[in-house]
Image (cartoon, grey):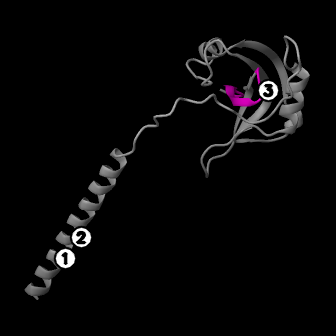
Amino acid sequence: MSTIVALLGALVLMLTEAQASAQGAKETNALQLKLPTQSPQRPKGIRALEIKPGRVPFTTNDVALYVQTHRLAKSVGDLSQLRVESLELITARELTTRLQGVSTGLPSRERVGFAIIRGPIYFTGPRPGKPVEFERGYVVFDASTGNLLMSGSLRLARE
């Protein structure tokens, strides 16, 4: 009986050491990842709006048509209820200030279209969570390409 207990103890010790060794190998591998060395590329975004020639590349109506026919990332609900409250052409730097540090990845002087969307807008999170309702959200388009760069929420509907 004591031999069996001793063998089981040795087996448990070997398994524990093997797990610790495997964990150390995983951590070592994670540390060996190398950072990219190429020059950063301009963010491309998702093809969205057609650019018009002139000073104003797209309009509030263009943005409204887009948000009422294309679902924003992680959003659910009735798209026909979404309205464009405002559209401004601002610099990427100004957008970063308004969104409290969130960056588009564009150079600071590049122009973007910043549109405020009024909902209700529902965004989902990790499962099994329920969608959260927001009163307002935003979409950001690259003013030189019309591509959608980012979207998100601004204020909960019921705080």
In the image, which residues are magenta? Answer: 143-158
Q: Nearer the viewer, residue 98 or 53?
A: 53
Instruction: Name the quarter where the C terminus is drawn.
Output: top right
**Residue count near mark 2 (Cα–Cα under 10 Å), binned few <14, some 14–19, many ≥20:** few
| Residue sitting at x 23%, y 70% | 15
- For mark 1, what is the residue? 11
- For mark 3, what is the residue? 146
Q: Nearer the viewer, residue 121 or 89?
A: 89
Separation (CA) of disc 2 from disc 3: 57 Å
Q: Nearer the viewer, residue 155 or 68?
A: 68
The residue tagged with tag 1: helix, strand or loop?
helix
Separation (CA) of disc 1 from disc 3: 63 Å
Horizontal relation, residue 107 to residue 37: left or right: right
Is the residue under label 2 in contact with that under label 1 (CB below 8 Å)?
yes
Q: Is residue 91 above or below residue 81?
A: above
Instruction: Name the quarter where the N terminus is drawn.
Output: bottom left
- Does the magenta segment cover residue 67? no
- Amino acid carrying label 3: it is Gly
Where is residue 4 shown, x and y percent of the image? Answer: 14, 86
Where is residue 102 shown, x and y percent of the image? Answer: 58, 23
- Amino acid carrying label 1: it is Leu
- Amino acid carrying label 2: it is Leu
- For mark 2, what is the residue? 15
